[in-house]
Image (spheres, rainbow, N blue to C red):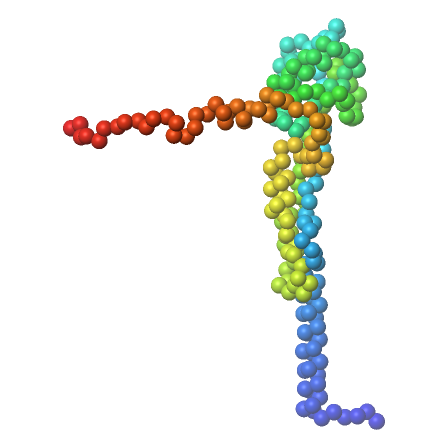
Amino acid sequence: MTPKLDPVSGRTFRLAARVLALGLGLALAGCGGMPTNASLDNVHQPVVEHTNYTFDFTTQPAGGIDPVQQHRLNQWFAAVELKYGDHISLDDPAQSGATHAAVEALAAKFGLILDDVSPVTEGVIPAGSARVVISRATASVPGCPDWSAHSDANYKNATSTNYGCATSANLAAMVANKEDLIHGQDGNGNTVALTNSKAIDAYRAKPPTGAQPLKQTSTQNTQ
């Protein structure tokens, strides 16, 4: 025989089971949205990407660049906003010293020097032409801002999923040479005395505060 439940107690049992199931469902849903980083490590780090820009120009038969091509190249440098942190190189099949010197002089106007080796680029350089390559690095923080944790429950005492986004994004934006985020500057042991002593010379040349006599002003009414 199938046991019979009292109508009142049976309804109470079914109601309690539904409440328990609902509570477990809400608990599991809350756990799925909790942050998981239980340390103070910043999981959002800047990512550096490189892009190559190329410019082909016609060279003179004996080497070098005519004024028209120099103007085109200079205008291209200005259009791409050539700046500190960019790497510029020359890919010249003729390996002309005059062409190299002309491009180097134009790059010097923007405060840059040519790299010794040019990166590999797509396409064949036409005969009688050379190619200037600008390698530019950019930094960004993918996935930021990160507000993926929607639950207020934090049973692991973990840091927010957005933790570190502001610091990493500001660092990526402020560093002038984005490659410094990867390996930093190489120390070669060489120093430039003029640059190093510039601040010291300015400090020594500046008269001390209060060394000059006070200016005398009249407080009498001139009217």
The x and y percentages for residue 195 are 59, 23
Q: Nearer the viewer, residue 134 or 188?
A: 188
Q: Is residue 2 above or below residue 38?
A: below
> How many labels sit on residues?
0
The x and y percentages for residue 101 are 70, 12
Where residue 116 sits, quadrant-wise, is top right
Residue reaching furthest to the top: 62
Q: Is residue 131 visible?
A: no
Q: Is residue 207 visible?
A: yes
Q: Is 3 placed left or right of 7 in the picture?
A: right
Give the residue at x 55% y 24%.
198
Q: Is 187 placed left or right of 81 in the picture?
A: right
Q: Is 68 placed left or right of 202 in the picture?
A: right
Q: Say which quadrant the C terminus sits in.
A: top left
The x and y percentages for residue 128 are 76, 12
Residue reaching furthest to the left: 223
Q: Is residue 63 above or below residue 4?
A: above
Give the residue at x 71% y 93%.
6
The x and y percentages for residue 126 are 77, 16
Give the residue at x 79% y 92%.
3
Give the residue at x 75% y 5%.
62
Q: Say which quadrant the N terminus sits in.
A: bottom right
